[in-house]
Amino acid sequence: MKNSWAMLLAGALIFSSCGGSQEEASSEISVPVSVMEVNPKSIEKFIVATGTANSASEITIKSETTGDYHLQKNPAAGRSFALGDAVGKDQVIILLRNLEEENNIRIDSKKLHLETSKLDFEKQKSLYDKGGVTLTELKNAERTYIDAQYDYDNALISLSKLRITAPFDGIITVLPYYTPGTRVAAAQTMVQLMNYRNLYLEVNLPGKDMGTVTAGQPVRVMNYSLPDDTLSGQVTSVSPALDPQSRSFRASISVTNPDLLMRPGMFVKAEIIVARHDSSIVIPKDVVLAKQRGKTVFIVQKGAAQERIITTGLENPDEIEVLEGLKKDDRLVIKGFETLRNRSKVKVIR
């Protein structure tokens, strides 16, 4: 019986001894953390807004007169014009043939009348200078010449109605089909053109940002389906008044789209850059802890975590500027900081 108690006591002593060793060992365990070296960089404060991209130039051209429809060839493609084709300013896209209308215009006759009346006016002016004709005769010749110029210009305008031309460089976005030679009535849609090398969008911004957003500020614009393609833009105008119902105000943004990556109608995100600081201490925003004493972060010094109270400046959704509390080359804890306390032992892992 004595031997049994001796064995139990010895076992208890051994267990107690082992437990004490485990507690001592656990108190020395280092917390694994990841760090980054703090280096100066730039930071931008920006306001995010969304809107729909619109082409800067857009027009729907309708027929102004009756004529037989003839779609012209695109010389760049060697075929008739089609949706998506680029056209140049003053390029003829569609011809409407109307022989009766063309005959009534009498373009050649009016051109000839203009030429002869001009010659007659110049002759009368020369004679008047020599005293060969009266002032009335000179003025009658001048009036005939001016009337001939008006007649010819009006004839050109009437003739131009039979030609559907591009008023600016653009892309064909609407081109209704008509059988070649079909008689088309007036006021029918012939073609729609857009120039979306330049885009614009209108965005609504919260009232708290009024006074922060101003014309001329740079903007980054991106489409959600094209996250890697960012375009440059600029705030062009800002409304001076709030919408009384939404308590928001409107701003217009112009966007350069040289490679036509973004298309009209796309839903886009705009980042309006309202402030920028260079050569600042900038850290990830999610490593900052809000405590009663203020905003804090942890750095690593000599194998231990050191808590730092920081003063911050500019910030955006991902980063924040540190004005006081950190310096260049500090080793900032970016992973594993959640459970740290001041002077906790740490083990840096990559």
Image (cartoon, rainbow, N blue to C red):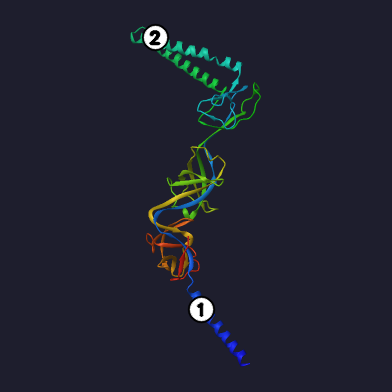
Q: Is residue 215 above or below residue 143?
A: below
> Residue at left 54%, top 22%?
160
- Label 1 element class: helix
Disc 1 marks which residue?
21
Residue 27 makes an appearance in the image: yes
- In the picture of the structure, the residue carrying the numbered disc 2 is 123
Residue 126, quarter of picture: top left
Quadrant for residue 163, please give it: top right
The residue furthest left is: 130
Q: Which amino acid, by three-letter code, is at mark 1?
A: Ser
Residue lying at 52% horizontally and 19% vertically, measured from the top left: 156
Q: Nearer the viewer, mark 2 or mark 1?
A: 1
Tell me: 50 left or right of 326: right
Query: Would you say 202 lies left or right of 309 here?
Result: right
Q: Residue furthest bottom?
A: 2
Find residue 324 and report its horizontal and vertical position in percent: 38, 63
Q: Residue 136: x, y in percent?
A: 40, 12
Q: Quick one: 284 or 187, which is closer to the camera?
A: 284
The residue sitting at 58% across, 89% down in the picture is 6
Q: Residue 296 falls in which quadrant of the image?
A: bottom left
